[in-house]
Amino acid sequence: MKMLGPLLVVSDLDRSRAFYERIFEQRVVLDFGANISFNGGFSLQSQGSWQKFIHKEAGDIKYGCNAFELYFEVEHFEEIYQKMLSANVEFVHTSVEYPLGQRVVRVYDPDRHIIEVGEDMRMVIKRFLRTGMPIERVAEVSQHPLEMVEALAKEL
């Protein structure tokens, strides 16, 4: 069995498509009208078609449950964060930095599905190395193998 990716039910397919294309730079790879798939490995399904598939009424479809998220990683975290700020998206929380050094932000899409954007850990490790933090300490703090940190140090 092969898992193909998550599917989000949306109330307005065109609005949601534009949101993911504009903010998250997703590109549609398949468009079936009521269902579209993005290059990021997830799909959107119109609420009306979804209701027919699962034999439910509109009131049975609930948005904003805060129990699921799509996760993206980016190399240039600050750029996407500023893009979100200027686009006036609704934040679950603004940028935070976790103890392992990764910066993350979570936003809601138009139907209140949570989207997390995290800084690529390779960039976190390089950021630590640029400050002069010893390689062994970078591996410890970032929770990544010493060999990986050493290889990234050679790239700098």
Image (tube, rainbow, N blue to C red):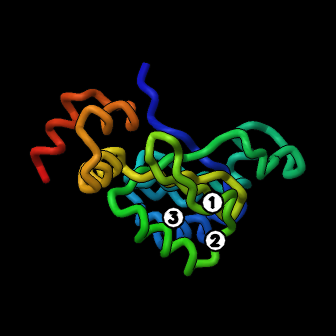
Tag 3 or tag 2, which sits nearer the N-term?
A: 3
Q: Please state the total of marks drawn on the protein image.
A: 3
Where residue 80 appears, as percent x and y from the top left, is: 45, 68
Query: What residue did someone put label 1 on?
Result: 107
Assess disc 2: are there few (<14), some (14-19) or many (≥20) residues with their C-alpha within 10 Å of its C-alpha.
some
Question: Which label sits in the foreground, 1 or 3?
Answer: 1
Question: Which residue is tagged 3?
Answer: 20
- Asked if residue 77 lies left or right of residue 63, the reply is left
Q: What percent of the width, then of the height, locates residue 111? A: 71, 59
Q: Is residue 153 above or below residue 84?
A: above
Amino acid found under the numbered disc labelled 1 = Val
Q: Are marks 1 and 2 in contact (CB under 8 Å)?
A: yes
Instruction: Describe the element under mark 3 as helix, strand or loop.
Output: helix
Q: Which mark is residue 89?
A: 2
Q: Residue at x 52, y 52 (%)?
A: 97
Instruction: Give the mark nearest the N terminus, 1 or 2.
Output: 2
Residue positioned 69% across, 67% down in the render:
90
Of 76 and 132, the residue lying toward us: 132
The one of 2 and 117 positioned closer to us in this rendering: 117
Amino acid bearing label 3:
Tyr
- Residue under the point 49% across and 75% down: 83
Q: CA distance from mark 1 to mark 3?
A: 12 Å
Q: Position of residue 122 (x, y in %)?
A: 29, 46
How packed mark 1 is, by other alpha carbons closer than 10 Å (few <14, some 14-19, many 20 or more), is: some
